[in-house]
Image (tube, rainbow, N blue to C red):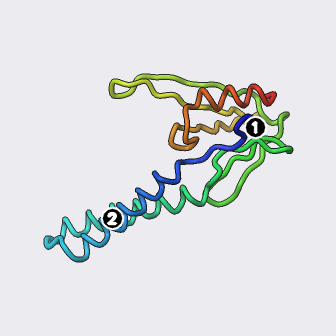
Amino acid sequence: MQQTQWSPPTLGIAACGIAGLMMAAAAVTVITDSPGRVLAGIAGVGLLTFASFSLRARPKLAITGEGLAIGGWLRTRTLRRNEIRSIRITEFRRIGRKVRLLEVDTVDDRLVVFTRWDLGTDPLDVLDALKAAGY
């Protein structure tokens, strides 16, 4: 049976949340200089926000009976087959390694880009599953 939904890894989201809590606690209790306290506080709040939004957007991409469901921070958007122009992989080198992105191009000229973090797996595997599902 083929996988039909993809989302960020739960362990990674939990690690970001724990790191955010630790940084926020360190900003309040450990750090004594004002600029360091502000920076650590901003970093802690940023990590907590990122973790909560990543948790909220699960699953990030799913194959449903109606089409492709794309999870967002506020709502889930469903793209029907006739609304999708193309689905492709973009590869480029960044900081000495190859990065793959899954791009979904819609007929209303919107481009939805998924990274490995968003999908929790290699975007090439997701493209294979989408092709097997008829996209």
**Residue 104, percent from left and from top:** 67, 33
**Residue 71, percent from left and from top:** 66, 51
The amino acid pointed to by label 2 is: Ile
The amino acid pointed to by label 1 is: Asp
Look at the image and tell me in which quarter the N terminus lies. Answer: top right
Which quadrant of the figure has residue 28?
bottom left
Q: Residue furthest bottom?
A: 29
Q: Is residue 29 left or right of residue 18?
A: left
In the depicted view, which residue is nearer to us: 11 or 89? 11
| Crowd rating for badge 2 (residues with CA inside 10 Å; few <14, some 14–19, many 20+) | some
Q: Secondary structure at mark 2?
A: helix
Look at the image and tell me in which quarter the C terminus lies. Answer: top right
Residue at 34% across, 64% down:
44
Residue at 51% across, 63% down:
52
Q: Is disc 1 in contact with disc 2, using a CB cutoff of under 8 Å?
A: no
Residue at 58% across, 41% down:
119
Vertical placement of 103 versus 19: above or below? above
Residue beneath label 1, please? 108
Residue beneath label 2, please? 42
Q: How many marks?
A: 2
